[in-house]
Image (cartoon, helix red, strand yellow):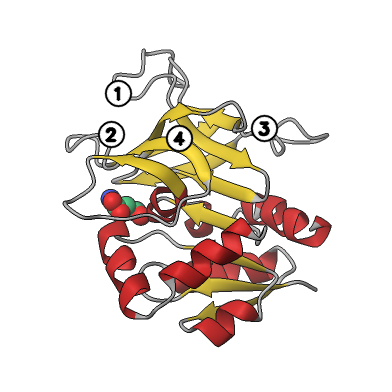
Amino acid sequence: TPTIGVLALQGDVREHVHALERAGARPVPVRRRSELDAVDGLVLPGGESTTIDKLLRIFDLAEPLRTAVGQGLPVYGSCAGMILLADRIESGIDGQQTIGGMDVLVRRNAFGRQVDSFEADLDVAGISDQPGGSPVRTVFIRAPWIEEAGPGVEVLARIPSRSTDGNPVQVGAGKIVAARQGRLLATSFHPEITGDARVHALFVSTVRAS
Ligand code: GLN
């Protein structure tokens, strides 16, 4: 059973812990460097990326985490966690830094105010296209999207151009909302709050294979 850390500085840590348990991993909270050094993989939860960025630096975890990513630690970032994994951000606050590792430009709070939060059924590559697979229920909460992705990035899901009722999608049609690069996985949405552990299981399989 792989030991997977959940960065526990801010955000929805408990939900990821439960989802990782359902996906067959042993989750542990990570707040210090010794805890980071002891995990086989790490989840960066949803929350507020600007706050998590500050706390990472205050807790002296930013550099060790960058080093770990560079050495191939599998990391899954959801929502704010996606922002932290991005090499470049748009609409960050002044001085906001990321850990980086994924060759993407991420737009914070991309879906805009009027549609701050919404749910959708999305096809996610590696999940929905498996035998017996089905779309993933996704929850977006003041979510980012990936504006540009480099050639090494595998796109796993995009916002469709039409919703299930056939109406054109007003905001974000075609934007990338799930992607993978090597051992890094990122989603704009929060699979940890739907009870569906398939995204976490996909990450656990990356950790097992590494
Ligand atoms: N808007 C948040 C940020 O910029 C992310 C929201 C979330 O993680 N649900 O960090």
Query: Between disc 3 and disc 2, whose residue precedes?
Result: 2
Judging by the rendered image, the residue that carries numbered circle 1 is 171
Mark 3, ligand 1, within 8 Å: the answer is no
Judging by the rendered image, the residue that carries numbered circle 4 is 120
Which numbered disc, 4 or 3, marks the residue closer to the eye? 3
Q: Amino acid at mark 1?
A: Val
- Residue at 59% across, 30% down: 155
Q: Secondary structure at mark 4?
A: strand
Up/down of 210 relative to 101, above or below = below
Q: Secondary structure at mark 3?
A: loop
Q: Quadrant of the C terminus?
A: bottom right
- Residue at 52% across, 58% down: 192
Q: Verify CB contact (< 8 Å) between mark 2 and mark 4.
A: no
Q: Verify CB contact (< 8 Å) between mark 1 and mark 2.
A: yes
Instruction: Place residue 73 in its image quadrant.
Output: bottom right
Residue 26 x/y as whole percent: 69, 76
Query: Between disc 4 and disc 3, whose residue precedes?
Result: 4
Q: CA distance from mark 2 to mark 4?
A: 13 Å
Query: Between disc 3 and disc 1, whose residue precedes?
Result: 3
Label 1 environment density (alpha carbons within 10 Å; few <14, some 14–19, many ≥20): few
Judging by the rendered image, the residue that carries numbered circle 3 is 125
Q: Amino acid at mark 2?
A: Phe
